[in-house]
Amino acid sequence: MRWSTRASARAPLPANQRQLQAVTGVALLNVVTGVSAWIVAAPAAWANDAQRNLAAAEALLAGHFGTVEGYLYSPLAALMTAPFARMPEAVAIGTWLAFKTLLIVVGALVALRGRPAVERTAAAIAAVAFLPIVYDLELGNVTVLLVAALAFVAWRDDGYLSGVPLGLLLATAPKPQLIFVLAWLILYRRRSLAGALATAAASTGLAVLLVGPEPYRAWIEALRAPPYLAGGQVINMSLTALPMPLAVLSVVASLGVALVAVRRGRWPALTAALALGLLISPYTLVYAAGIFLVAAPALWMGAPRVLLALALAAPVGVVVAFPIWVGAVLAAAAVLPGAAWHAVGRGLPAGPGAARPPTPPPGAALNP
């Protein structure tokens, strides 16, 4: 009896159990670190961006858009926020928080469809409690919407309608980090790009007709010199914040690594584009790293051990070594073998005209 007990203790767990243990462990780690970070940051960060958005909507309705310090979204964004401005502030912020949380949960469940229900649930918890997402939820920022819009493009076949949500984001919150994503769209999602640009142009034109050109002039003026960025009120996590010689070398190195990743295919190229957007943007804050949730299912189904290592390092990495952690994601996109990324195509849409091999059984991703 003693011998059989030892033997069973040494027997490896089935692959699906190892996979479930991994995602559950990440979920627990994220909950602990995410809740702790929320509590610590709450006095200074709670609903800052949400309150600013509501104030900008009220300013637009009152005819003096551009007077809310630090508001960098377009007049269209303020116009779309106007219905929330008519609610009690607590209700508006609570609705916004619940909506974004629901987006993340639904996205995680959809991305891992076909996996065991308990694994999908743990993945959803891990995604919501991912530190950058926690910070985005606490501030009331729009990173979660950006994740949803990009997922709508990346996780689906190429099509004009797939680009509509991204087009609305381009018209309301055109973040600098999207430049490299647009380059990825040129290579892999041209119809979606056309849909996004058409939506952005049409919605912007409609907004100008509704609110007039003056709010847009004020918006462009605000974008030229954001006061809270120029005044050092936030910590810029991008490579552009490094001393000049080191910044240039780091940017050149990042571009070189990204070119290697682009040659490996659609998913490595997307992961590289997301990383470059964070590393080379004029400014990057911690919550921006939440955008990696778009590529997380691809890494999980193609290289789960790599994703597990990045996830375990994230709570510390995104806070104290942001460029290094993002650089590790970029390096993973460049060095992972092509076979790993090919495995991703078996779990997520492969694109128009592409062959669709059958989905592997649960737990197969962790097999050697």
Image (cartoon, rainbow, N blue to C red):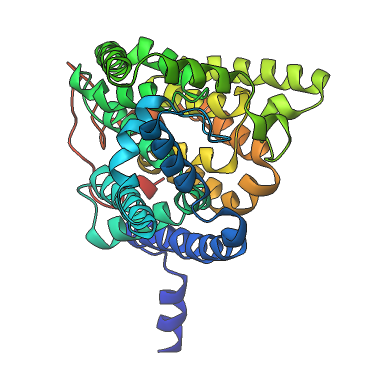
Q: Residue 303: which quarter of the image?
A: top left
Q: Is residue 236 above or below residue 367?
A: above
Residue 194 coordinates in the image, percent (x, y) = 27, 11
Which residue lies at the image location 52% right of the left edge and 60% below the top edge?
Answer: 34
Up-down: is 103 above or below 217? Answer: below
Q: At 82% across and 18% down in the image, what residue appears?
A: 245
Q: Position of residue 75 (x, y in %)?
A: 40, 26
Q: Is residue 139 visible?
A: yes
283 and 180: which one is in front? 283
Q: Quadrant of residue 280?
A: top right
Q: Nearer the viewer, residue 240 or 96?
A: 96
Q: Dividing the image into 4 quarters, which one contains the N terminus?
A: bottom left
Which of the pair 208/281 is nearer the observer? 208
User: Which residue is at a point 48% across and 23% down the rendered structure image?
Assistant: 273
Q: Name the foreground residue: 192 vs 158.
A: 192
Q: Could you tell me if residue 303 is visible in this image?
A: no
